[in-house]
């Protein structure tokens, strides 16, 4: 069964000049939701660093994915797609970019 699951396609992160900026949601460390990411051989646990909701309706999750021995890398994936599945939800209320930016002002 697992051999029929496609490895999820990465989404290029948004950058200025590509249209309206997405709304960004984050959670405090230790309270983040997480996904399982299929790597072609097994499911890997990946905490969510942020959720980006684009004005065109796309949703992109930035995940902290295990990479190599003891390493991790941040990767972006459009949701939904095969090869991604929720591991668990957040344990605390999310923070939006607007709240984060106003707190840092």
Image (spheres, grey):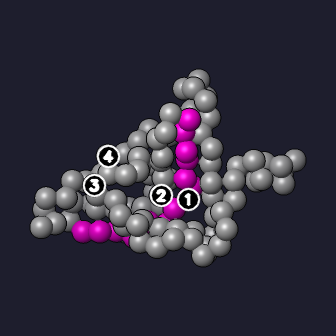
The residue singled out by tag 3 in the image is 82
Question: Contact (CB < 8 A) between labels 1 and 2?
Answer: yes
Q: In the displayed image of the protein, which residue is found farthest to the right? A: 105
Q: CA distance from mark 4 to mark 1?
A: 18 Å
Q: Earlier in the sequence, mark 1 or mark 3?
A: 1
Question: Residue 11, image x and y in percent?
Answer: 41, 42
Q: Earlier in the sequence, mark 1 or mark 2?
A: 1
Q: CA distance from mark 1 to mark 2?
A: 5 Å
Q: Is residue 1 left or right of residue 40?
A: left
Q: Nearer the viewer, mark 2 or mark 3?
A: 3
Given residues 84 and 13, the one toward you in this image is 84
Q: Please tell me whether residue 49 belongs to the stretch shown in magenta.
A: yes
**SS at mark 4 in the image:** loop
Q: Please tell me whether residue 96 belongs to the stretch shown in magenta.
A: no
Q: Is residue 103 left or right of residue 88?
A: right
Q: Which numbered dot is residue 9? A: 4
Residue drawn at x 54%, y 26% is 18
Question: Residue 40, image x and y in percent?
Answer: 21, 60
Question: Contact (CB < 8 A) between labels 4 and 3?
Answer: no
The residue singled out by tag 2 in the image is 63
**Part of the protein shown in magenta:** 42-55
Residue drawn at x 55%, y 45% is 53
The residue singled out by tag 1 in the image is 49
Given residues 53 and 15, the one toward you in this image is 53
Q: Earlier in the sequence, mark 4 or mark 3?
A: 4
Q: Main secondary structure of the magenta part?
A: strand
Q: Earlier in the sequence, mark 2 or mark 4?
A: 4
Q: Quadrant of residue 17?
A: top right
**Observer able to see residue 14:** no
Q: Quadrant of residue 103?
A: bottom right
């Amino acid at each position: 069964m697992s051999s029929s699951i496609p490895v999820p396609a990465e989404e290029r992160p948004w950058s200025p000049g590509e249209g309206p900026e997405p709304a960004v949601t984050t959670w405090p460390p230790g309270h983040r939701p997480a996904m399982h990411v299929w790597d072609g051989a097994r499911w890997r646990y990946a905490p969510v660093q942020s959720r980006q909701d684009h004005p065109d309706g796309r949703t992109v999750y930035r995940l902290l994915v295990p990479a190599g021995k003891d390493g991790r890398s941040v990767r972006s994936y459009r949701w939904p797609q095969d090869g991604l599945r929720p591991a668990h939800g957040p344990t605390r209320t999310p923070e939006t970019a607007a709240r984060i930016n106003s707190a840092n002002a």
